[in-house]
Image (spheres, rainbow, N blue to C red):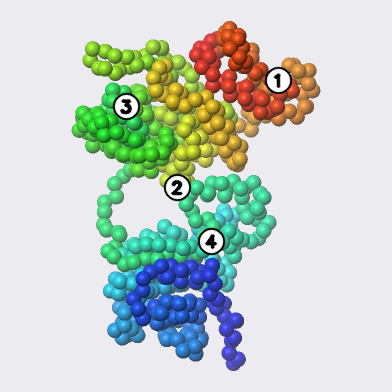
Amino acid sequence: MKNKSIDEYPYKFEYAFDNVYGHVVSLLGQFDFPQKGVHLDIGCGWGAISDELISNHNLHYIGIDADQDAVNHLQSEGKEAYTYQLSSYNANLEFFNGILNGRTISSISIIDTFEHVLYLEELLQTISTLSKDHHAPVVISVPNFAHDDVVFKLLCNKFDETNTGLLDETHINIFTEEKLIESCGKFGLHQINKKDVVIEKSDQHFPKELLTLAEKSSLRQLLINLRSNMKANGKVNQLVRMFIASHPSQVPVIQQERPFLSIVTRTVGDRPEELKEVLLCLTGQECTDFEVLVVGHNLTLENQLLVEGVINDTPEWIRSKIRLLRVNGGNRSTPLNTGFENATGQYITILDDDDIVFSNWVEEFKNLSDKNYGKILKSVSVRQEYEQTKTDFSKRSSRAVSGFLNDYPAEFDFITMLHHNQCPGLCLAFPRSIFHDFGLRFDERINTIEDWDFIVRSAFICGVASSNVVTNIYRWWLKGASSQSLHNEQEWEDNYRYVQNKFNSQYLIMPPGNAKRIASMVGALSEFQNKSYGLPSTLDDQLAPKRQIAHHILVSNSWNITKPLRAVKRILGKKTCIPELFSASEAELDEFITNAQNSKSWKLTRVFRSH
């Protein structure tokens, strides 16, 4: 029989700087090798890394493979190589110790071999022992089963095995990053470095007509958007990781059930009396299946002691549920990300250090979750105006100066939420998966409306289950420091535009019922155009919604009541620019709407708009 040429073998791959072999050598090159040590290449194939290690790293190369032809090729080049079929731990150790014959291992590589091995745990135990005995690093590479191409094809029931590649027909083990690290950690191999091979379009990027692979299809863009924050290694073709052996990372532990709710309370420590009220509210909860994460942001030593004192003054049963986390730097979003990252609950909610919740707050979330687990859970907030005051008992206290104001609707409105926020954070509980699995974070590039941005992005993935039960009070401070007073109108406007542009750049998932509502809105706007401007209802005016908002402002009670204030502004040379609705550009409409709705006079006259 005619012998095959080297090029006819499916696993004969060449060394390149930016392929798996180059990445393995690069990782090994970062390690300080003992002089003239042995490099053990298990599953060496045709020895693609052998020349680099011998010539550039002064290592003695030993290749081991089950393929006799590959081993013969290496031996023909004068390299030490052995044919061996990996099996049990004891047999493996006996073989390796035999060929080493007392020599010291400097490093080990196992390149694209794990996926072919029948006795994987036996091999892992072998490698761990060799690494520990010789203090040698181990570089392991495996195909990444979580590549976008594989995941997106599985969504269409496509599983195309090939001769080589990600879905090689001879693979008997599959790996993701999590599985590789977990499998190695079980045998005391701990990751110390990595250099993965990134390929945007893998060998599985076919057929091109499949909508989940077609570059311009909305479905593909939506899926890419969903996976972009998930740390899913969606573009990684091969995981290339360096490990060193130590003690096993997995020890027998009793898995504790997650609490239902994690409550994240951010504070800078300057409102100890209000923080006391928050924790007092929590002691009165009907459902106590929760934990509390008090996140101290940029705490001075004095304020840290105040916060710790407030926590220590709580009853022992709730004090045991509280963790104090300290965070320095960043903005208002930073402590939220820290709190969510450390939360262990099935759901996570935000309860700032000046909010008030009723005894049914946690219970209502729990009741909603019974039939809506996985959705964002929403109860109803009422707004109440407060001001700071002093009493005979405290230098700093607060008092309510209004009744309950029903500013926030009971039902979550997806469409309206695209325009402005209707949900204080404390009326919502988020599934932990949205943060811990899907990778959504509070945007630390903005100092305001960070909650609105996070809520909307989460809602279009999870959906929202709403209750009409009032469970909390959102305190509105008329004087003193608050997010409204600490950031000027220009900053609010800039952040608003930034968030809206973010929404506009993404594919959004709309829940059932909204198509009909959007159609009705388009019809109403068309009718409005016809009545207000004498325009044909078929006119395609993309700015009609903004013209309508501007129109409502101009005919509102608030606008009429504040007319004298605008007259004074004109005298002072601060004229309010009122656009001509039909001819105004989008920028002019946006500027007018934003300035009007963010003005103090608009906020102060809110009550008159309800009549």
Pointer 2 or 1: first along the chain: 2
Pointer 1 or 3: first along the chain: 3
Structural distance between the alpha carbons of marks 1 and 3: 46 Å
Disc 1, SS = loop
| Quarter of the rendering occupied by the C terminus | top right
Neighbor class of circle 3 (other Cα within 10 Å; few <14, some 14-19, many 20+) is some
Residue at image mark 1: 581
Pointer 3 or 4: first along the chain: 4
Q: Residue 132: where, in percent of width, then height?
A: 29, 71
Amino acid type at circle 4 is: Val
Amino acid type at circle 3 is: Asp
Whether the residues at callouts 2 and 1 have beta carbons within 8 Å, the answer is: no
Please identify the quarter of the rendering in which residue 206 is found: bottom right
| Residue 484 placement, left or right of 2 | left
| Residue 588 placement, left or right of 298 | right
Q: Which residue is drawn at 55% across and 31% down?
A: 494
Pointer 2 or 4: first along the chain: 4
Amino acid type at circle 2 is: Asp
Residue at image mark 3: 270
- Residue 437, numbered label: 2
